[in-house]
Each structure stands twice: as C-alpha cells, then as structure tokens.
Image (cartoon, grey):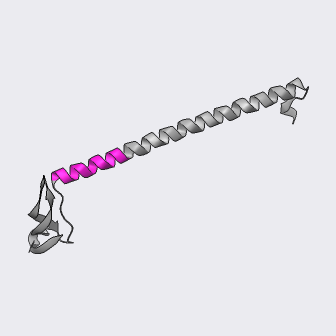
Amino acid sequence: MKEGGDPIHPMGVELGIWLGQYGNLELPWLRWWDSQGNLLLTGDERARIERQRAEQAEQRFEQAEVELQQERQRAEAERQRAERLAELLRAQGIDPEEL
C-alpha cells in the first residue's frame, strides 16, 4: 500500500510511504515506485523472487523427469507384452510379422 508520493520526474520515480514488513518489522517505510506506480523491489526482494522462480523451475524439471521415467517404463512394459504375444503366436505356428 502506498501513501502519497513525491514524484521525481527526471528519474521517472517517486518516493512514498509503504506499509509493510521489511526485515522483521512491520512499519511504514519510505520506498521507491516507478512512474506507473509499481513498487521498486529491494535487492533482497528481487533475490527472493528469483530463488522462488529457480525452485519452481527445478520442481517442474524434476516432475518432467519423473513423467519421462514413467513413460519409459510404460513403453518397456508394452514392448515386453508385445514380445510375449509374438512368442505365443509363434508357438501356435503363426508368424506375427505376417499378420
């Protein structure tokens, strides 16, 4: 939440009071905003967001690996099933390649 705001036009920013938590304190803080009213993040805030993005990307990657392994297992099980069926056909004197 921003209260007031003093624009600094040459820089395209403004200063205002932001009520929020910084460190372990929830207080009104003097913060910077861009000319569109978006809060400019501190280095710690940007780093936290980037860590979260990296963690989410890692989780998506790990999930994709799990899904890939499951698909490989399913494909191998299907290949083995097809081979067993082909062996049964051969045992009956039927060439599965001619079907």
Tell me where residue 33 sits by quadrant: bottom left
The majority secondary structure of the magenta stretch comes to helix
Tell me where residue 75 sits by quadrant: top right
Horizontal and vertical percent for residue 64? 48, 42
Tell me where residue 96 sits by quadrant: top right
User: Is residue 19 found inside the magenta-colored segment of the image?
Assistant: no
The residue lying at 75 percent from left, 32 percent from top is 82
The residue lying at 48 percent from left, 38 percent from top is 65
- List the single residue furthest toward the top: 91
Quadrant showing the C terminus = top right
Left or right position of 52 against 93: left
- List the single residue furthest toward the right: 93
Left or right position of 96 against 67: right
The residue lying at 87 percent from left, 29 percent from top is 95
The residue lying at 83 percent from left, 32 percent from top is 97
Range of the magenta residues? Answer: 43-56
- List the single residue furthest toward the bottom: 4
Left or right position of 80 against 20: right
Horizontal and vertical percent for residue 79? 70, 32
Horizontal and vertical percent for residue 9? 10, 73
Q: Is residue 25 above or below residue 89?
A: below
Q: Is residue 49 above or below residue 27?
A: above
Q: Is residue 14 above or below residue 59?
A: below
Left or right position of 40 against 55: left
Quadrant showing the N terminus = bottom left
In front here: 38 or 92?
92
Q: Is residue 40 above or below residue 81?
A: below
Counting the numbered discs, the total is 0
